[in-house]
């Protein structure tokens, strides 16, 4: 019997090497440099996982009889009796985050026969690494479209994985970060699979199994983070229009594709509503109405301007001591322009740094947006050359899908957060992946557009590389700090060595 040979392509080696580096760095951050002892920040999803394993929907922890005896247990004067920031309903504790991370935890513990409590840090690592894998697959397919060399592909993958705030959240891994990571991993997984379907729809037949798998991924994203619903709806519409109307308006094909893509999302949405009904006796109560918290969710249009500035432009602090780039808690109005009026009730205590200041590879995102609109206007209005190719011979239909989909992942994912009464680093992760993909697409588009000029193309390649490397450096420096100066707290000896070796100034007493 002949033996089958297996040969890994150069692209495969590039992806494998980059993802190995990502995994090692993520583990270094999650363990504060020990590589073995991972600090435990939270166990909420594990408590819910244990609840699922015992056959109920509440977490494996019970409120005290003293708390339940109060006429209004939600009153903040009883916070010493609370399990903070969970939902209390009819004498039981629930989580208002989606159940997918807890389901994953329960399955993993059952398969591996783990009986003790396991911190949420492993979920955070797994979900953000999964998001990095799907981001790498998307970038790899983009690189094929635009004939990007492997060096720039590798830098793009690393910039995507290390762009702030992913390292920041991996290094301070709790229930909040796990919910965000699960949503991003599943959302990007759906985009990566849908990319394949769009790529092959040119032949006139959509790979519907891929559409179904994309729908499953997006249903899981919805059940991880319900705030992703607007983005998922727009991604489904964009994908269906692109696959079904690639050559002409084929409504029969559209309906068939819609069934395969939409059925998993519809079933997942129904399951999520049933989950709510079983817990809170209400289809649309996700648990936020019964929170035990000092900071209940408040939404208002008056917060939009402050949030937009914070997420895009809020400056970071600098120091001559490692890690040089810092962001602190409780900085009040520091970093907010004096000309900007801070709305009443707006919370300023959470650390946040503007994306455009520390994620330079997003700076070129206007390029694909402008090119897509220009090419689309040619087709709609019949102006000028009607050739519908993207840059460097890339099929415009596929290029346009990438542009629109990445823009959705970078904007519609933050519809709820933009109206919230605060800005925080973890919510920045909801939009960063899409904006980074869009910015890298812009950088690679610029390079492809200069294919006829050797020195200009080399300059564009250098610009791409510089933007990616700057993104990597900023992301890792902020990730080293994390929400709570993690290395300084959990590995002070290593932190002291880093500070002494890398700082460009010395503290008193050295």
Image: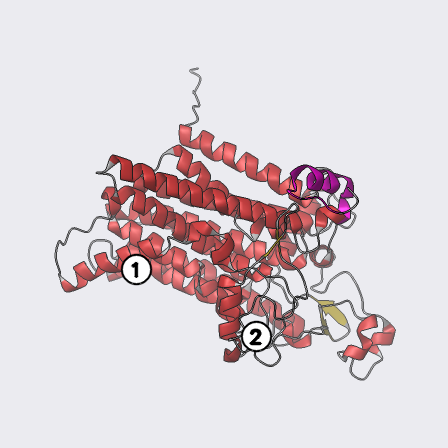
For mark 2, give the secondary structure: loop
Pick the front one: 282 or 308 = 308
Quadrant where the N terminus sits is: top left
| Mark 2 and mark 1: Cα distance apart in space | 30 Å
* Residue 136 visible to an observer of this rendering: no
Q: Quadrant of residue 458?
A: top left
Residue found 53% across the figure and 68% down from its top: 417
Residue count near mark 1 (Cα–Cα under 10 Å), binned few <14, some 14–19, many ≥20: some
Residue 506 counted in the magenta span: yes
Q: Residues within 10 Å of mark 2 (few under 14, many from 20)?
A: few
At numbered mark 1, what does the secondary structure look like: helix, strand or loop? Answer: helix
Task: Give the percent coordinates (x, y) of residue 227.
Answer: 52, 66
Relative to 424, residue 134 above or below:
above
Left or right: residue 492 compared with residue 425: right
Residue 25 visible at all: yes
> Farthest residue in the top direction?
1
Q: In terms of sequence position, does the residue under pointer 2 or pointer 1 come before the other?
A: 1
Where is residue 138? Give x, y as percent: 41, 45
Q: Which residues are magenta?
A: 489-507
**Looking at the image, which residue is at 54% across and 57% down?**
429
Q: Please tell me whether residue 236 belongs to the stretch shown in magenta.
A: no
Q: Classify 114 as above or below 256.
A: above
Residue at 70%, 37% in the rendered image: 35
For the point 85% across and 70% down, the residue is 64
What is the x, y in percent for residue 4?
43, 20
Residue under label 2:
284
Magenta span: chief secondary structure: helix
What residue is shown with label 1? 241
């Amino acid at each position: 019997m002949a033996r089958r040979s297996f040969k890994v392509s150069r692209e495969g080696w590039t992806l494998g090497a980059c993802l190995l580096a990502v995994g090692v760095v993520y583990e270094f951050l999650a363990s504060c440099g020990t590589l073995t002892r991972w600090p435990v920040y939270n166990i909420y999803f594990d408590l819910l996982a244990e609840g699922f394993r015992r056959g109920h929907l509440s977490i494996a922890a019970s409120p005290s009889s003293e708390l339940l005896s109060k006429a209004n247990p939600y009153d903040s004067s009883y916070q010493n009796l609370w399990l903070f920031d969970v939902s209390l309903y009819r004498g039981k504790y629930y989580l208002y985050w989606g159940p997918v991370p807890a389901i994953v935890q329960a399955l993993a513990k059952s398969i591996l026969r783990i009986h003790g409590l396991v911190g949420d840090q492993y979920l955070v690592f797994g979900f953000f690494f999964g998001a990095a894998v799907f981001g790498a697959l998307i970038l790899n397919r983009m690189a094929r479209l635009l004939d990007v060399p492997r060096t720039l592909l590798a830098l793009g993958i690393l910039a995507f994985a290390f762009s702030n705030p992913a390292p920041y959240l991996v290094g301070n891994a709790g229930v909040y970060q796990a919910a965000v990571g699960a949503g991003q991993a599943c959302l990007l997984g759906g985009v990566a699979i849908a990319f394949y379907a769009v790529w092959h729809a040119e032949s006139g037949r959509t790979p519907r199994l891929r559409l179904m798998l994309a729908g499953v991924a997006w249903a899981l994203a919805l059940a991880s983070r319900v705030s992703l619903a607007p983005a998922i709806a727009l991604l489904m519409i964009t994908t269906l229009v692109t696959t079904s109307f690639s050559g002409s308006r084929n409504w029969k094909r559209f309906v068939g594709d819609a069934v395969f893509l939409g059925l998993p999302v519809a079933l997942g949405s129904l399951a999520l509503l049933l989950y709510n009904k079983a817990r809170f006796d209400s289809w649309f109560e996700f648990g936020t109405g019964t929170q035990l918290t000092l900071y209940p969710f408040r939404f208002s249009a008056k917060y939009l301007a402050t949030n937009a500035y914070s997420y895009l432009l809020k400056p970071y602090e600098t120091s001559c001591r490692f890690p040089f780039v810092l962001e602190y808690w409780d900085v009040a109005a520091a970093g907010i322009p004096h000309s900007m009026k801070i709305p009443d009730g707006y919370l300023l205590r959470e650390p946040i740094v503007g994306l455009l200041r520390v994620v330079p590879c997003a700076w070129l995102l206007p390029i694909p947006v402008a090119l897509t609109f220009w090419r689309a206007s040619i087709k709609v209005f019949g102006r000028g050359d009607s050739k519908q190719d993207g840059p460097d011979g890339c099929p415009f239909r596929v290029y346009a899908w990438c542009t629109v989909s990445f823009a959705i992942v970078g904007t519609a994912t933050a519809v709820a957060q933009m109206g919230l009464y605060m800005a925080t680093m973890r919510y920045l992760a909801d939009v960063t992946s899409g904006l980074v993909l869009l910015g890298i697409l812009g950088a690679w588009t610029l390079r492809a557009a200069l294919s006829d000029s050797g020195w200009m193309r080399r300059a564009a390649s250098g610009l791409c590389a510089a933007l990616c490397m700057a993104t990597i450096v900023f992301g890792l420096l902020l990730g080293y700090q994390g929400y709570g100066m993690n290395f300084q707290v959990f590995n002070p000896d290593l932190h002291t060595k880093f500070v002494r070796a890398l700082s460009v100034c010395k503290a008193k007493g050295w």
